[in-house]
Image (spheres, coloured by chain):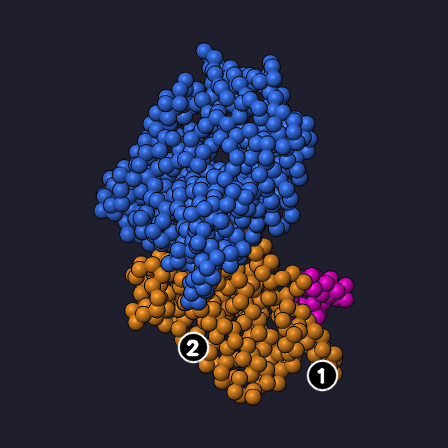
């Protein structure tokens, strides 16, 4: 459809007539209009609200003791001070002074105790519940101090606490209202359409660079793109395909930014079954696939090729694409060496939604070149869950893994892909009990190197995180880790 | 008008069938070869352009014709066979059995074809050409069975059947020599109409990712894949879309023309 870019230009020109004279000045009271595909189911992150609530509320409405920054670092927010006992089991947090909730209640240690226990509670459906299971007790010895006692050492405690909202203990049910300490308060939530936030005037920290925000929810990517084109929103938080970008390219009315997501496209082998229990076979298949070409097919020139499971926003990232570079000649030799000079045949369980079928087709053609026959079996997401994830009844499968810091899956021999290396299991378990973050990082880096050397899985590429906005706004986060969308630094031209 | 539609139908179906047959012997490119760049516009080398993997799109659309026709013919044959048997059985069965069967058929018909087909695919290990044929064929058989039951009952009420019965003819002989010849033209037209619907059902199943697995792309799957690239490469949607329309339109014209030719009494709405 050729008309679309011209159409965009026409609107751009109309806008420019109003906007350009004042581009340099930003409006401190501007309301940022955000287009998103992820409407929350409710407003409580322990009640199955979905990723949309993290996008709208994390660090905007609710703050934690710590925050996961857009670069993947952990930094203190409501915790002014953090000390750890000799044995590493007692963590003492001192709270920031002068913080009050939106309702006017001051922040106390009891609120923090309440908030942590809320996530750990039996009825909590928080996806982070299990990562807090090392917590034995939370005490509030005085108004400003919180003491967390652990069953075993956990260097990731501050990181895990970035997922815990500090909620007023008098707030009660927060599935349709809020009482946080963040720079924005909830004004209105119209289900199925929009959620509005407004600047909190008594915020304890620096005032945000704008007056508030409205999240407009769409159910379809095309409608989302169109909303930005027609200036109904200022920014869209995720672009699902590179081809939609054609609408926004070639005009200075829109800014296209690319960050790193944590979504990894991969082919997981069942490492328990032959021939995938053989490291040489796995390495051969890693070398047989032109990952760059696959990435280009799906994401054009965006995203990045992976040599392992760890993305650049995890602290233990290392570029390991050189371990098994694309080399079909070497792949054939390695297969012969492993006892498969004529190749072999396997079934690839392929989820029926994009980009898996096209990836499967690509693999079939790539692996045919080294004599390996791929039988594509299309399955639904449900079948994937029961057959592959639960019953582990498969040879190889395609999947995308979206979580941040999820290398821990390789430390669990019972995980669906069945990778079992005692050294890696030990490194991952002991990393958690490290005394320092450096030690933890070093151990996980080692584990990452081992899984890459052993080609535990065939990692293909990392999805790009694409945000498109009107060029009038700036200062929004690019990586969107944990689906977060920090509002406080976004500026809009007057 | 009847002869005209028959000829247009024959032409369109013949064209698709010709392409489908041709793919058995010759294709412009190897369907798995990544012969061109990503999403190339139409050119002499690639008349329909290329897809995201750089594969020739004309090749894919041609293979799609083969798949559409295989599933269409397979499902129509299966549905026609099962439907006719069931329908005749119901017509001959005792009152209570007949009522039960008729009610079951009505319930089956109330299920959308696509939903029924999805159930069959879900019950089997993964989707394939076979499951698509089975699924759509089964859904179709209920519609054919209902029609055959009514037609058979009508034939059975005729005087010459009573005469045949009196002369001691078994019900097997009655079916073969009296019932089938009488209902066949109508059933054929109904099956032909169902054939067109089967092609659409297959495309819908594939669109949902439940049809034939890649790389044997069916039109529905091509349409699904092209969805995200529709602005950059509109040919990805136009080519399989036109192909699908040409085949289904052709089949419907053919069935229409056939109906007039055979003077068959199929109510179009009824057969649907």
Q: Quadrant of the N terminus of chain A?
A: bottom left
Q: Answer with left or right where residue A274 lies relative to residue A36.
A: left
Between residue A35 and residue B163, name the one nearer to us: A35
Label at residue B160? 1
Residue A386's x, y, as percent?
A: 53, 42
Colour of chain A as rendered: blue
**Left or right: A224 as drawn, with respect to B171:** left
Q: Quadrant of residue B239?
A: bottom left
Q: Is residue A351 above or below residue A433?
A: below
Q: Residue at image x 44%, y 54%?
A: A21
Q: Which residues are magenta?
A: B86-108
Label placed on residue A46? none
Pointer 2 residue:
B15
Secondary structure beneath disc 2?
helix
* Residue at disc 1, secondary structure: helix
Q: Chain of mark 1?
A: B
Q: Residue at x 56, y 69 (%)?
A: B197
Instruction: Rate crowding at label 1 as few (under 14), some (14 to 19) or many (20 or more) other CA atoms within 10 Å.
Output: few
Regarding residue A468, the answer to whether it shows in the image is no
The residue positioned 68% from the left and 76% from the top of the image is B151
Relative side of A62 to A492, left or right: right
Could one spot residue A318 in this view of the protein? Answer: yes
Q: Are marks 1 and 2 in contact (CB under 8 Å)?
A: no
Q: Residues within 10 Å of mark 2 (few under 14, many from 20)?
A: some
Image x and y of residue A458, in percent: 36, 41
Marks 1 and 2, Cα distance to the nearest angstrom? 44 Å
Q: Please tell me the colour of chain B.
A: orange
Tell me the quarter of the picture where residue A413 sits.
Answer: top left
- Location of residue A393 with respect to B202 vertically, above or below: above
**Percent from the top left, x then y, of residue A417?**
43, 37
Q: Quadrant of residue A54?
A: top right
């Amino acid at each position: 459809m050729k008309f679309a870019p011209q159409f965009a230009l026409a609107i751009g020109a109309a806008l420019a007539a109003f906007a350009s004279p004042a581009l340099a000045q930003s409006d401190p009271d501007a309301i940022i209009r955000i287009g998103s595909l992820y409407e929350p189911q409710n407003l409580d992150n322990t009640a199955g609200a979905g990723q949309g609530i993290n996008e709208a509320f994390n660090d905007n409405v609710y703050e934690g003791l710590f925050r996961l920054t857009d670069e993947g670092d952990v930094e203190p927010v409501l915790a002014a001070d953090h000390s750890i006992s000799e044995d590493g089991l007692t963590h003492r947090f001192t709270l920031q002074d002068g913080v009050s909730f939106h309702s006017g209640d001051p922040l106390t240690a009891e609120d923090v105790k309440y908030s942590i226990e809320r996530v750990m509670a039996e009825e909590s459906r928080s996806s982070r519940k299990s990562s807090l299971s090392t917590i034995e007790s939370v005490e509030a010895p005085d108004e400003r101090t919180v003491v967390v006692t652990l069953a075993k050492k956990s260097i990731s405690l501050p990181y895990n606490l970035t997922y815990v909202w500090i909620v007023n203990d008098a707030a009660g049910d927060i599935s349709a209202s809020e009482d946080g300490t963040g720079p924005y308060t909830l004004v209105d939530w119209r289900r199925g359409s929009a959620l509005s936030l407004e600047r909190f005037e008594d915020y304890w920290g620096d005032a945000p660079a704008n007056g508030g925000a409205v999240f407009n929810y769409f159910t379809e990517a095309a409608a989302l793109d169109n909303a930005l084109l027609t200036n109904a929103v200022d920014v869209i938080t995720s672009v699902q395909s590179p081809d939609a970008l054609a609408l926004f390219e070639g005009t200075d009315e829109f800014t296209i930014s690319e960050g790193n997501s944590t979504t990894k496209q991969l082919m997981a082998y069942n490492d328990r079954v032959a021939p995938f229990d053989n490291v040489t076979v796995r390495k051969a298949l890693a070398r047989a696939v032109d990952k760059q070409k696959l990435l280009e097919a799906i994401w054009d020139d965006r995203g990045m090729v992976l040599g392992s499971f760890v993305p650049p926003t995890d602290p233990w990232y290392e570029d390991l694409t050189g371990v098994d570079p694309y080399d079909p000649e070497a792949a054939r030799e390695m297969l012969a060496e492993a006892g498969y000079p004529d190749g072999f045949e396997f079934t690839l369980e392929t989820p029926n939604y994009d980009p898996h079928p096209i990836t499967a087709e690509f693999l079939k053609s790539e692996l045919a070149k080294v004599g390996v026959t791929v039988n594509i079996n299309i399955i639904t997401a449900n079948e994937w869950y029961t057959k592959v994830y639960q019953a582990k009844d498969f040879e190889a499968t395609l999947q995308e893994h979206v979580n941040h810091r999820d290398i821990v899956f390789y430390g669990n021999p019972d995980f669906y892909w069945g990778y079992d290396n005692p050294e890696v299991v030990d490194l991952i378990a002991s990393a958690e009990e490290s005394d320092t973050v450096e030690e933890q990082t070093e151990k996980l880096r080692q584990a990452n190197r081992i899984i890459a050397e052993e080609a535990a899985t065939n990692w293909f590429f990392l999805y790009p995180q694409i945000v498109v906005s009107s060029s009038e706004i700036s200062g929004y986060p690019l990586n969107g880790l944990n689906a977060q969308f920090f509002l406080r630094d976004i500026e809009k031209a007057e | 008008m009847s002869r005209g539609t028959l000829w247009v139908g024959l032409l369109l179906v013949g064209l698709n069938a010709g392409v489908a047959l041709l793919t058995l012997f010759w294709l412009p490119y190897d369907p798995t070869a990544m012969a061109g760049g990503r999403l190339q516009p139409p050119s002499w080398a690639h008349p329909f352009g290329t897809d995201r993997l750089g594969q020739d799109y004309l090749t894919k659309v041609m293979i799609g014709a083969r798949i559409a026709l295989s599933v269409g013919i397979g499902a129509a044959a299966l549905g026609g066979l099962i439907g006719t048997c069931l329908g005749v059985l119901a017509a001959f069965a005792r009152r209570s059995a007949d009522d039960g069967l008729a009610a079951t058929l009505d319930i089956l018909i109330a299920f959308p074809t696509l939903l029924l087909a999805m159930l069959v695919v879900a019950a089997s290990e993964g989707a394939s050409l076979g499951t698509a044929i089975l699924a759509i064929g089964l859904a179709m058989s209920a519609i054919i069975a209902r029609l055959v039951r009514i037609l058979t009952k009508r034939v059975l009420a005729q005087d010459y059947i009573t005469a045949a019965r009196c002369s001691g003819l078994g019900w097997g002989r009655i079916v073969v020599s009296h019932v089938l010849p009488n209902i066949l033209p109508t059933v054929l037209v109904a099956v032909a109409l169902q054939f067109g619907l089967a092609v659409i059902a297959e495309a819908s199943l594939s669109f949902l990712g439940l049809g034939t697995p890649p790389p044997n792309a069916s039109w529905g799957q091509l349409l699904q894949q092209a969805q995200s690239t529709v602005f950059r490469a509109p040919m990805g949607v136009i080519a399989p879309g036109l192909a699908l329309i040409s085949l289904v339109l052709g089949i419907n014209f053919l069935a229409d023309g056939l109906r007039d030719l055979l003077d068959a009494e199929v109510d179009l709405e009824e057969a649907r």
